[in-house]
Amino acid sequence: MAVRPDGVFINVPFDRRYRKLFHALVFTVHECGFFARCALEGDDGSQMRMDKLYDIIGDCPLGIHDLSRTTLDSVNRLPRFNMPLELGIFLGAKRYGGPTQRRKSCLILERDSYRYQKFCSDIAGQDIRAHHDTAEDAIVAVRNWLRAARPTMPMPGGDALARRYVQFRLDFPRMCDVREVDRLDPPFLDYRTLVAGWLDENPRVGSRDA
């Protein structure tokens, strides 16, 4: 995929428990005028996973990183460190990359305020936003960050955006049925297409910069 100046790398868990937040994040990114990207967008068996991540991170000026699931796995009793690893790669690109990479901006999400200090204290001092495992709080956090990252771009306020997401979710099962997409676990590329299509068919009326 060609480099997009509106690309937002989404670094989150991809399991069933996190799906409601992941879907809300993708919707928010697109409703605010950006383009969501993540490791699920490619299915090239010849490409190493880390190479794919390097490419996407290098392409995206913006990134969302959720550390809320850095917890012990119920089977192996070991923590999941994929999200902190990918955050580190993103921050490394910003610190050591060229002029374009140094303009990167990221949002770090957590479930609760200050929980990250127990397992990743080196990021203390950065703005960490808590979503409390709710789509509404995640939507507002992402919207406010994107607003600050691109202050000249008009976008809806957080409450209005959350209401739009509720309407989208009401329409979502019908859209999946029409397109013969699994409504319970839609592939990322299909979900992104459904979001973009719904936004095209349901433009905001009388919106103004909040």
Image (cartoon, rainbow, N blue to C red):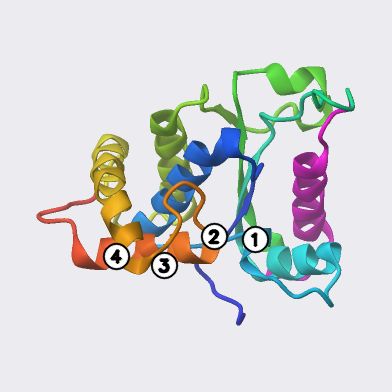
Residue 8, image x and y in percent? 56, 59
Residue 159, image x and y in percent? 27, 34
Residue found farthest to the left:
206
* Mark 1–mark 3 distance (CA, rounded to whole Å): 14 Å
Is-magenta flag for residue 88? yes
Is label 4 or label 2 in front? Answer: 4
| Mark number, residue 193 | 3
**For the residues bearing labels 1 and 2, Cβ distance under 8 angstroms:** yes
The mark that comes first in sequence, 3 or 2, is 2
Which secondary structure dominates the residues rendered in magenta? helix
Magenta region: which residues?
78-100
Element marked by disc 4? helix
The mark that comes first in sequence, 4 or 2, is 4
Q: Is residue 207 visible?
A: yes
Residue 139 to residue 73: above or below: below
Is label 1 or label 4 in front? Answer: 4
Is label 3 or label 4 in front? Answer: 4
Amino acid type of the residue tagged 3 in the rendering: Thr
Amino acid type of the residue tagged 4 in the rendering: Val
The mark that comes first in sequence, 1 or 3, is 1
